[in-house]
Amino acid sequence: MTYPTQPTASHYVNGAYVEDTEGTPMPVIYPATGEVIATLHAATPAIVDRALAAAQAAQAEWAALGGTERGRVLRRAADIMRERNHDLSVLETRDTGKPYQETSVADASSGADALEYFGGLAGSLTGEHIPLPGGDWAYTVREPLGVCVGLGAWNYPTQIACWKAAPALACGNAMVFKPSETTPLCALKVAEILTEAGAPPGLFNVVQGAGAVGAALTTDPRVAKVSLTGSVPTGKKVYAAAAAEMKHVTMELGGKSPLVIFDDADLDDAVGGAILGNFYSSGQVCSNGTRVFVHRAIRDAFLDRLTARLADAVIGDPLDPATNFGPMVSEGQLQIVLNYIAKGVEEGARLVTGGQRLDRPGCWITPAVFADVTDDMTIAREEIFGPVMCVLDFEDEDEVIARANATEYGLSAGVFTRDLQRGHRVIGALQAGSCFLNSYNDAPVEVPFGGVKMSGVGRENSKAAIEHYSQVKSVYVRMGRVEAPF
Ligand code: NDP
């Protein structure tokens, strides 16, 4: 079967698709069936060089435009993305395996939100006037950084490309984006749409490849900033490489986030939050609340309600709009998850439901819930990045706060309670960048998103992202005479 939206070559450089068959072949596999749906080629050094040169040339021209003009291009791109939401969602589903029921509301649409939001901000990115004694004054200028590199994970290929491109371009930067080699298709469509919306050639380029291509981009002297969405081990490498040349970074990394459910919580909402925070996108979401601390008094009721609702999961053809649970992204990721499940059983956790590989082609597993999980178990400490929920019991507020914070990660945290004071008090004490009260995993573009501790550096989305894609120049203006000591 062919799909009209499939990109026509591996890379997108200087406003056009580019192929270089010298690069290592990269088969793209539809995880729902195991079928190879495209074969791309990793970027050769020549392609990387062309992309960076094109970005550098485009950046100067782009930065010289008025912010409103830049914003208009981004907002046009947002409109095109929304018009093509169906086709882009089908492509996202084929790239990742995520069900169309999700991709049609959470991927191109979220990317369009970012383009629209930062397009709207572009015209108001100004400095400030600072009055000083004696009539002197200073002003600040918000300047772009230059050429930015974006490195993407495989779970949200369209969204990640847009969350990085939109603020970068709004601030007057250019970008070279490298998608995950597992899901290389969607970012190419973002590039195509930006060109169609009026972005100059070279402003947003996409080059394919694995970590080596990302490393070549990170260390290139033409690059001023690197924004990574990925795992903590990769984040450490990329951060260190960027630091060697004092480059700016944004690091959106992994997590093992706590979701704390008190005994006064609305049980259905809490179960819904736990489902959203563990099984959406088959659990392949960085901010997932995978350590679900449930107050002992409601633990059994919670598990009963949860298992009843999981029985309603529709696992099947991801392109069928009725399906709400798709496959894992790849055989490799599925094996990682199966190994964690085996480890959980081996270390004494109780597998309440799921965790079985389905006997069909593709990377299918049923959503798994472990109960009687203790803090020291491997499944409670390490990021699994799959549909595995760990339920841990607790009795006391101070105890649960201490246990929730006893991790190197700090991406997200959630609390379910009807007690207003307790909700804010506990959220205030949790070490996490993106928190939820009586909700889980919302990510509107207006709100800063990012982690503390090992989960990251910097913030995406919201006005906060502007700080990470621009730098401030201060200009001191003396109105009187210059008084020197000699
Ligand atoms: P990885 O860390 O494996 O890869 C992320 C990207 O970095 C990929 O494009 C990868 O290339 C590239 N890369 C790998 N090594 C290097 C290197 N040395 N230099 C430069 N680039 C490199 O992450 P995954 O793709 O496996 O994604 C899953 C992880 O991402 C999870 O830990 C998850 O929590 C995190 N994540 C964080 C989010 C957040 O916003 N905080 C959101 C989504 C995911 P390639 O893979 O092609 O080899």
Image (tube, rainbow, N blue to C red):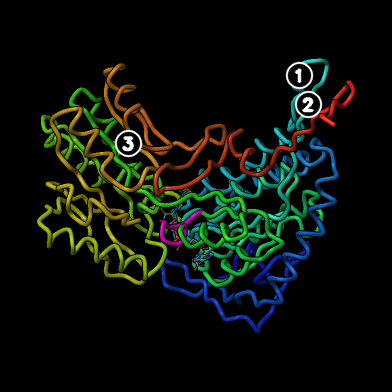
Check disc 1 and report the residue beneath it. Answer: 132
Question: Which amino acid type corresponds to the residue marked 2 in the rendered image?
Answer: Ala
Check disc 2 and report the residue beneath it. Answer: 138
307 or 218: nearer the viewer: 218
Residues in magenta, as a range: 229-235
Crowdedness of circle 1 by 10 Å Cα count: few (<14), some, many (20+)?
A: few
For the point 32% across and 43% down, the residue is: 257
Q: Residue furthest bottom?
A: 22
Question: Looking at the picture, how far across and down is residue 406, in whole percent?
Answer: 26, 43
Crowdedness of circle 3 by 10 Å Cα count: few (<14), some, many (20+)?
A: many
Check if mark 3's residue and mark 1's residue have beta carbons within 8 Å: no
Check if mark 2's residue and mark 1's residue have beta carbons within 8 Å: yes
Question: Which amino acid type corresponds to the residue marked 3 in the rendered image?
Answer: Gly
Question: Which amino acid type corresponds to the residue marked 1 in the rendered image?
Answer: Leu
Q: Which mark is residue 273?
A: 3
Q: CA distance from mark 3 to mark 1?
A: 51 Å
Which tag, 2 or 3, sits closer to the chain's start?
2
Q: Is mark 2 within 8 Å of ligand 1?
A: no
Question: Looking at the picture, how far across and down is residue 73, in whole percent?
Answer: 77, 44
What secondary structure is found at the residue carrying circle 2? strand
Q: CA distance from mark 2 to mark 3?
A: 49 Å
Q: Choose mark 3 or mark 1, whichever is in front.
A: 1
Question: Looking at the picture, how far across and down is residue 373, in whole percent?
Answer: 15, 48
Q: Is residue 302 left or right of residue 54?
A: left
